[in-house]
Image: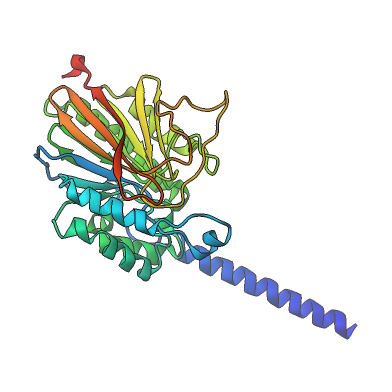
Amino acid sequence: MIKNKNFGLIAGSFLLITVVFYLFYSINNKNNFLINYEKPKASVPIYSSQPLAIVGDLQRTSFYELLIGREQNDNERTKIIYAIADENPAAFVILGDMVFDGSDSKDWEIFNSLIKPITKKNIPIFPVIGNHDYWGNNNRAMRNLAKQFPVFLSTHWYTQIYDSLALIFLDSNESDLTETGWKLEHDWLIKTISIFDTSKEIKGIIIFDHHPPYTNSTVTSDEVNVQNNFLPAYYNSKKSILFISGHTHTYEHFFIKDKNFIVSGGGGGPRVKLKSGNDVHKDLYTGVSPRPLNYLLINKESDGIKITVKGLNKGSSKIFIMEEFEIKFNKEEN
């Protein structure tokens, strides 16, 4: 009887501790940070003949990932950043997952060291938030992120203007946003696209987020939340021409419902293989997987944009062109 009582006390104490810990963890990881969702930071137009440079998933491979055989791409990651700096872009877009653990200040120190070739040239940096950037304690992760990029003190989604292109940056981490925040972002996107669609100064709209609505990855899958929350506005827009995501550590190019989609998660995260067969999305890029590490350049032209995809093979130092294509503006709307 005494043993049973002791066991009951121990079990009850363990249960109480578990509940308390869960409540504490939930409170400290449920986005208690203040976000003014309704007042995004004002845009500063960028007028330049130089391209936009875009890269996704710069995070290092963790110790635990290395144990299960995932690759580390430190050398290649550095080479990609130097190559981007040498392009002298008008702006540098990061598609999320800048670090492995957003709550770890040491990871951000490594990130700052990595992007010095960019910051030394005072190239503007426009990031979106990846799932790894939220990792760990959310409050700590968001403090680290906002310290790095002050735009996130006021909002998780914002716009920039590049010549006559409207650039929209979204937070696709539904589970890390409050339900209210997710709805506000949805409503904001609809309103923002409507404004750009009717603006005489805007010829095309490009949307950036972290999670791809479509992918053939063997590790991740289509992001249904992005399909439901972001794509209706993208498909219905008169001027939207391109949706760019990261997250999947590869390169993919889809043309679905008369709209272009690019997945560019080749900044240094461990690369993934892609599915094949009849049940996959038709990929306009036909290279085998795992594909080269990669980054994008977007040049604004008079009647559209030109996308140049640059690659770097594992273990190589030679940057090469993987793919080039153009997307025309909708003439009826311009």
Is the residue 8 above or below the residue 278 in the image? below
Q: Where's the C terminus, which quadrant?
A: top left
Q: Is residue 40 visible?
A: no
Quick one: 151 or 323, which is closer to the camera?
Answer: 323
Tell me where residue 207 appears, x and y as whole percent: 30, 36
**Is 89 left or right of 75, judged from the image as shown?**
left
Q: How many marks do you count on the picture?
A: 0
Image quadrant where one finds the N terminus: bottom right
Q: Residue at point 18% right, 49% down?
A: 86
The percent coordinates of residue 205 (x first, y second) are 24, 31
Colouring mode (rainbow / by chain / secondary structure / one colour): rainbow
**Closer to the camera in the image, 319 or 26:** 319
Above/below status of 208 relative to 234? below
Q: Residue at 27% x, 53% y: name it.
A: 81
- Establish if 235 lies above or below 150: above
User: Taking 95 as reference, is 275 left or right?
Assistant: right
Q: Looking at this rendering, what residue extends furthest in the bottom direction?
A: 2
> In the picture, residue 243 is in which quadrant?
top left
| Residue in front for this viewpoint, 173 or 78 | 78
Q: Residue at x 15, y 38 (%)?
A: 162
Residue 88 seen by the camera: yes
Asked where in the image residue 197 lies, by quadrant, the reply is top left
| Residue 89 x/y as whole percent | 17, 45
- Percent coordinates x, y for residue 204 in the rendering: 21, 28
* Residue farthest along the top direction in this orientation: 332
